[in-house]
Image (cartoon, coloured by chain):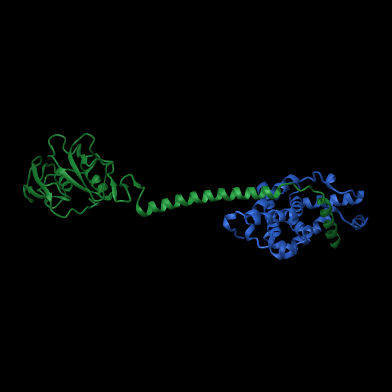
Chain colours: A blue, B green
């Protein structure tokens, strides 16, 4: 991605950028939250990702959200690397943020989210991009700098691990269908 | 496996659907991006100026400083290095290396019976150290006795036939003769670049007792080429 005019946007470009943020900030924030498991940190990552997106805005050629999502994933990875090991995030205000639901469904959802946070950073990032952002395997591979084969194998292992962590059995399907 | 995938999709969506999106995200991002860009421009411009100045200096010689060679400017001006006192050989080498022409203008007799070589060396240079002169300028050296002068490098004395010192530089002649325990009287005929011995008495090959005086006449015998290997 190349910047033009030294990264300073024209007025019209600023307006386009503001429209982009209004349309995609919610999705990007949710992605960031699922990646790092902390709302405050997710907001910081989103702000940084948007700043970088703004700096490269003139050269993004119609795919700014994908670029911002890639920056988010990289920022999360950088943070994990700085910490040395994957942090043990807590769910924080999950219950307050969740929509009213049947108790069993809420418990199942919390179990899955907790299981997601117990995965390795790569496994979590792959699952978030694949099943929350609905990226294809190729798009996920591009966003995370992995090969498509690695994304496939990581997805398979991550789901198996998630099933194991959440101890999902036949009752899981029952819970989601209530 | 499909069930886990479906459950996970739904869990992630429901878990995050009520997250509050901060306000002013776009304006903050634009503000920070602009500020970062300007800061980067300042850094880049400063770096470019420094690199350009360094490049120009390297190309023209400005700022090239060597403690032994002196400071050479773009206009070919040389700062005379600090060689006020010291060994004649060393001083001549340093002046030559700085692009100057050392010229011995005064070399009084070596008092062999007294101090001998001890303290005999360069006691004054003109123009003085630190002066800015055009490259290639002559720097006049005055030899003599000074407790701070480095003296002249010499080998062990021996009695022998008077060696031929014609054509040698003054310091080479002095070293050769004083090293044989002769007293030396040097007369500078005409101060000039590349001062050489143009006459000697006694003549080469004459046996001369220790502590006797050899008289030399120094003058310009060639074009004054600077020989840093003196």
Quadrant of the drawing holding the N terminus of chain A: bottom right
Position of A118 with respect to A72 (left or right) is right
In this picture, is B124 found above or below B138?
A: above
From this view, report whether residue B114 is shown above or below residue B3: above
- Total of numbered circles in the picture? 0
Left or right: B180 in relation to A127: left
From the viewer's perspective, is B69 left or right of A16? left
Image quarter of the C terminus of chain A: bottom right
Residue furthest front in the image: A11
Q: Which residue is rendered at x = 81% and y = 55% of the image? A: A162
Quadrant of residue B147 within the rendered picture:
top left
* Residue A25 x %, y %: 74, 53
User: Would residue B169 be found to the left or right of residue A113 on screen?
Assistant: left
Question: In terms of depth relative to the viewer, which is nearer, B190 or B75?
Answer: B75
Residue at left offset 6%, top offset 50%: B203
- Asked where in the image residue A156 lies, by quadrant, the reply is bottom right
Q: Position of residue B22 (x, y in %)?
A: 74, 46
Q: Position of residue B94 (x, y in %)?
A: 27, 47
Of residues B92 and B70, the one nearer the viewer is B70
Residue B53, image x and y in percent? 42, 50
Of residues A100 and A152, which is closer to you in this image?
A: A100
Q: Between A148 and A9, which is closer to the camera in this rendering?
A: A9
């Amino acid at each position: 991605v190349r910047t033009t005019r030294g990264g300073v946007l024209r007025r019209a470009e600023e307006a386009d950028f503001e429209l982009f943020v209004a349309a995609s900030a919610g999705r990007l924030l949710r992605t960031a939250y699922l990646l790092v498991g902390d709302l405050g940190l997710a907001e910081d990552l989103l702000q940084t990702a948007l700043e970088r997106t703004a700096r490269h805005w003139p050269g993004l050629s119609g795919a700014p959200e994908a670029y911002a999502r890639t920056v988010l994933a990289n920022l999360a990875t950088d943070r994990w690397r700085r910490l040395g090991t994957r942090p043990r995030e807590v769910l924080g205000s999950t219950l307050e943020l969740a929509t009213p639901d049947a108790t069993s469904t809420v418990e199942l959802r919390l179990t899955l989210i907790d299981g997601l946070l117990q995965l390795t950073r790569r496994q979590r990032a792959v699952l978030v991009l694949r099943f929350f952002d609905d990226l294809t395997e190729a798009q996920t591979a591009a966003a995370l700098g992995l090969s498509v084969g690695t994304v496939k194998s990581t997805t398979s292992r991550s789901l198996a691990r998630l099933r194991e962590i959440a101890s999902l059995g036949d009752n899981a399907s029952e819970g989601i269908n209530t | 496996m499909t069930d886990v995938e479906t459950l996970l999709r739904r869990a992630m969506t429901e878990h995050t659907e009520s997250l509050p999106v901060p306000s002013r995200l776009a304006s903050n991002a634009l503000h920070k991006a602009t500020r970062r860009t300007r800061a980067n421009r300042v850094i880049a411009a400063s770096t470019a100026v420094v690199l350009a100045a360094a490049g120009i200096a390297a190309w023209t010689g400005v700022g090239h400083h060597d403690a032994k060679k002196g400071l050479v400017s773009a206009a070919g001006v040389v700062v005379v290095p600090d060689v006020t006192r010291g060994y004649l050989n060393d001083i001549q080498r340093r002046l030559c290396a700085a692009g100057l022409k050392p010229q011995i203008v005064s070399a009084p007799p070596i008092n062999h019976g007294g101090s001998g070589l001890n303290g005999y060396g360069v006691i004054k240079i003109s123009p003085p150290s630190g002066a800015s002169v055009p490259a290639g300028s002559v720097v006049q050296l005055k030899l003599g006795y000074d407790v701070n002068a480095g003296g002249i490098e010499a080998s062990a004395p021996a009695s022998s036939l008077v060696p031929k010192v014609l054509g040698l530089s003054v310091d080479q002649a002095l070293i050769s003769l004083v090293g044989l325990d002769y007293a030396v009287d040097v007369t500078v005929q005409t101060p000039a670049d590349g001062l050489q011995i143009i006459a000697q008495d006694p003549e080469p090959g004459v046996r001369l007792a220790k502590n006797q005086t050899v008289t030399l006449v120094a003058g310009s015998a060639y074009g004054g080429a600077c020989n840093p290997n003196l």
